[in-house]
Amino acid sequence: MKLVRLQGGLGNQMFQYAFCKLLEKNGASAKLDARHLGRYTPPRSLALNRIFADADRYSWNEGEPWEGRRASTALLARHVLSSRLLRLLGSREIIVESSGAAVDAAGAAAAKYFVGYWQSEDVVRQVEQELRQALIALTEKDKASLHVGALRDDDVALHVRRGDYATHARAAEHHGVLPLDYYQQASGICAARGCRRAIVFSDDIEWCRHNLRQLPLELVFIDPVEGRDADAELRLMLEFKHHIIANSTFSWWGARLARHGSDGVTVAPLRWFVKSKAGFLPASWNVV
């Protein structure tokens, strides 16, 4: 059995889930190791089972027998090791992602433990049908908690990611907050394609109310509600035909697995990170 380490927030975990599915599709038994999520401050939550109906069957429990042929992988069954230490171990049975490099078939076959984000359009494309089949639909409870009413064909889901991108020095240096000019250009593209209203998703909705007023679209804001999980917002994003995404895997997935497929328009930022572009944007998307 192979293990894929879960790390990061919901959007990142979805890439790791997709990678696990690809290993399985290629003939391996594969599961997800969620122990690393507890090392974040505050700890990350496991939300995949609120997005995908089959997510629980990929969860690896510490009590399950698993070990590799070497002492290093046997150690992994009992402890959460850092990526730096795993690289130093240098085992063929442990693959630590490096700069988004793809894992070749031979390397994947030999490996037993995978550490990385695996943000890859190629991976998603290969298991897209399986991902779509496993999606949990938006529920009436979700709709009631989001307070947006009926969606229209001329609506666009607009996501603004701020949070730690704006307040945490390391995240700001690596990711950075998108400029208002991006949202101006993206809204113009969508308006030219017939969009009239933007439903705004954000972790800083008050900032959006104050700063997005000049966009050429009617604006409706998804207000935060105590106790509502972010997965409800993601499942709502999937119902839109059009999307303006942030430099965030959260809205990347909202657009990528949208139920309308390629019928609508999606606008994404060219500069995904402060110092580099994203290598996992579908070719059909509009990049600004």
Image: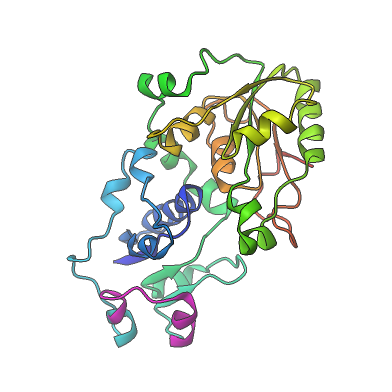
Q: x, y (%) of residue 279?
A: 67, 56
Q: Is residue 108 magenta?
A: no
* Quadrant position of the C terminus in the picture: top right
Q: x, y (%) of residue 160?
A: 64, 39
Left or right, 177 with reference to 19:
right
Residue range of the region highlighted in magenta in the rendering: 75-89
* Nearer to us in this view, 171 or 282: 171
Left or right, 200 with reference to 228:
right
Establish if 62 lies above or below 270. Answer: below
* Nearer to us in this view, 140 or 16: 140
* Nearer to us in this view, 278 or 185: 185
Establish if 212 lies above or below 1. Answer: above
Left or right, 10 with reference to 179:
left
Q: How many marks?
A: 0
Q: Residue at x 38, y 71 (%)?
A: 113
Q: x, y (%) of residue 151?
A: 55, 15
Q: Residue at x 49, y 80 (%)?
A: 84
**Residue 50 occupies which quadrant of the picture?**
top left
Q: x, y (%) of residue 11?
A: 50, 48
Q: What's the magenta bit mostly, secondary-structure-wise?
A: helix
Q: Is residue 86 magenta?
A: yes
Left or right, 51 with reference to 282:
left
* Quadrant position of the N terminus in the picture: bottom left
**Residue 80 occupies which quadrant of the picture?**
bottom left
* Nearer to us in this view, 196 or 1: 196
Tell me the colour scheme of the image. rainbow
